[in-house]
Structure formats: C-alpha cells, structure tokens
Amino acid sequence: MVKIYALLVFVCFLLIDCNSFEDKSDLDCTPCIDWNACVLKDQIEYRIQILSRISESNQVLSRSYLSESDHQASLLVQEWMNTAGMSVSIDFVGNIIGLWSSSTLKTHESKSECCALSKESSCETDQDKKTLVLGSHIDTVWNAGKYDGTLGVLVSIAVVSMIQKNSISIPFDIAVIAFADEEGNNQFGTTNTGAKAFCGLLNPISDFLNTYPELYKVLASQMKLENRSFTQADVIQAIQECTSDAFVSSKSSMLGFIEVHIEQGPQLELMNRPIAAVKSIYGQSRLRVSVVGVGGHAGTVPMKARRDALAAAAECILKIEQIGLEYWENGVATVGKIEIVGGSSSNVIAGHVEFSVDVRHSEDSDRLEMVSQLYKE
C-alpha cells in the first residue's frame, strides 16, 4: 500500500518537474519516464492557461465563490474530469467531485449534476470501498496567481488520466475534488465552505444558513429552485435530500488526502529546490476588528484632543505584527485589509476603522494562544 501511495505522489511530482517540449520530435523524456507523462504535463499547462483567462476582471485574475466566472471554470473542470474517466457530481455548496473506481478501467458515463442540483441525477457511491482523495481549489483571491489551487486540481485529474490510460491496477478508488470557497473571496463572508461541508462541519445546515442569510438565496438558484418562490426551508430540504447519498468524508472510507500546491513563500527558491513535501498544515483563525473613535476636521481639532480611529488601528496592527514575530518559527499574523468606514478624505480624521486579522500556526494550541494575546492587547 505504501508503494501505491508513493506511485501516486511520484506521478504528481513527475508531471510538474518534466521539462517543456515544443513538439514530439524534441522529446527527451528521461525525467518523465514515458511520453504519456510529458503529454499530460503539457496538457496541464495548457489548461492552466485556459482557466487563467476565466475571470470577473479584465485586468487581474479573480474568480470569487459562486460567481459566473466560478461557474464557467467549474464546467470546464467537470468536462476534464469526465474525459479522464471519472463520474462527476457537485455537492450542495459547489464542491466538484470526480470519482474514479478501481473496479473498472473503462470510461465512466458522466454524471454532470448531483442530486443537489437535479433530483434525477445519482450521487451514490460504494461506502465499503477505500478512497484516496486528491485535489485543491479553483476559486481565487483578487489578483491571483494562475497556479494557486488550479495546479493541484489539474495535476490530480492528470494522475487519474495516467492510471486510466495505462490500465494501472490499484486497490482503492480515487476522488478528485475541487473544493469550493477555499479563498473566502465572496459576497457572503464565508471561507473554506467546501472543506467544511466535505468534513461534515456544516451540520445543522440551518445554523450555517442563518449565519450567512444571503448565501441560501444563491444556493437556491444553483439548485434550480428559482422558478418558484423559495424559502430557507426549501433550500435546507433540498440539501438534506442530497447529502444522504453524496460523497462525504469519513475516516473509515478515506485512505488519505494529497494536495499538490504551488509554493506561495520563498523557502524552496532560497534553497534552490524544485519541490518538497510539507511537514505540517497551518490552522487558521480569522478575526475582524472594529476601532471606533471620533471623526473631525484635520485642520481644526488639536492633536491632544483627538480620538483618531486610524491611528489607534495602526497601533493595533503593530501589536499584531509583534505577536506574529514572537511565534515566527511556526506562526504568522497578518492584517490584509483595512477600511475607513463611511469613506475617507485627506482632511478628515477617521472616526471608524475596521480591519481583518489572519492568524496561523502549525499547532492549534499555539494559534489559540496567539489569538488570546491579541484580545489581551
């Protein structure tokens, strides 16, 4: 079994590390082992370019959760999964799930819609089979890099394609998942919604929809309830009808999860290494801080009489950076967004400021301690 895992990881690494070739006559596939890997590598690069053009902005790459660009990218990924030999479904929050069965090597008939989107479609899976999960995400931040998330999804599809085309026998099934809402770039205020749904962390679903009331309206449209008046109860019922049969994570059926991802930091470049395996995954806490002061005219309010919300926010941000530096070996703390509520002007003292805080650490206990320190400060 360990060798099988090694094979899949090796294939993933193989597809990334293979040199680029202009045409077949130039092929020297020493690093690729065979021609198939080189072809798939070029296919991955081509598909990355295609997806990089699907954006809600003409200037930068941005695909927010449940946007039209997200939908268009989803359709392409579903098509590519089907071509690789997978049966394809979408769960109630938009996770794209491609299932490849080890019991057959023939191309599966496509299931382009799951029961969350169409009651006639089937989402049944054999719960007794073991499944190795591969994947990443296709939603993006604003001004995103084209490899972020997308690389992991497309490499995973290529792994299944290679296994299918070469009739490689393995003793377990493979699920390739493009997780929805990984980035938190959306109008609802949610993040990691797809992963939470996959792990069964959105139950009861009514509590989740009550927390994000605007989301259920969009989900209702996705579920094709737009042709009649719908309520939150309609959405919950449709979701519950689907989740009983949809592929859901369980420790008893999952062998593990492998994600190939572009490095977004400088470590590999500094070490002059093309690839590495991570030692841990950072847990994340997200906060939103509101600083309320007193607005005023920049030219008439004396310095000692001011309650400048922006100046206070700046002091808070420096404290957050200091806490991050105290845990620098395995922790980080970031303020990535700041807003002067009600608008800003060069001659106005800010009266209300809000900013985001992102705290991460490889150990949950240390991450929670970092957050605790933030509250104390």
Image: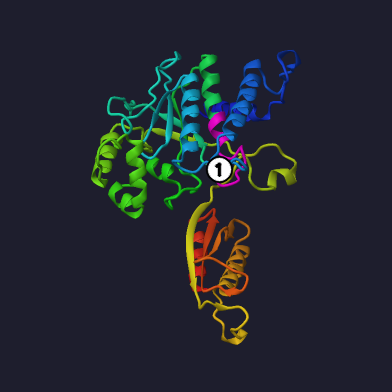
Three-letter amino acid code of the residue under disc 1:
Ser
Q: Would you call the spot at circle 1 few (<14 residues within 10 Å), some (14-19), or many (20 or more)?
A: many
> Magenta region: which residues?
140-155
The front one of 86 and 60 is 60
Judging by the rendered image, the residue that carries numbered circle 1 is 62
Location of residue 315 by image quarter: bottom right
Q: Is residue 367 visible?
A: yes
Residue 177 location (% of width, % of height): 46, 33
Is 359 located above or below residue 51 in the figure?
Answer: below
The front one of 145 and 40 is 145
Is 347 located above or below residue 330 in the figure?
Answer: below
Predominant SS of the magenta segment? loop
The front one of 42 and 71 is 71
Does the magenta-highlighted stretch encompass residue 143?
Answer: yes
Location of residue 41 by image quarter: top right
Residue 247 location (% of width, % of height): 36, 32
Q: Is residue 342 left or right of residue 115?
A: right
Residue 207 location (% of width, % of height): 30, 52
> How many marks overall?
1
Q: Is residue 191 left or right of residue 345?
A: left
The front one of 362 and 344 is 344
Q: Is residue 77 left or right of residue 110?
A: right
| Image point (42%, 45%), residue name | 193
Q: Is residue 204 visible?
A: no
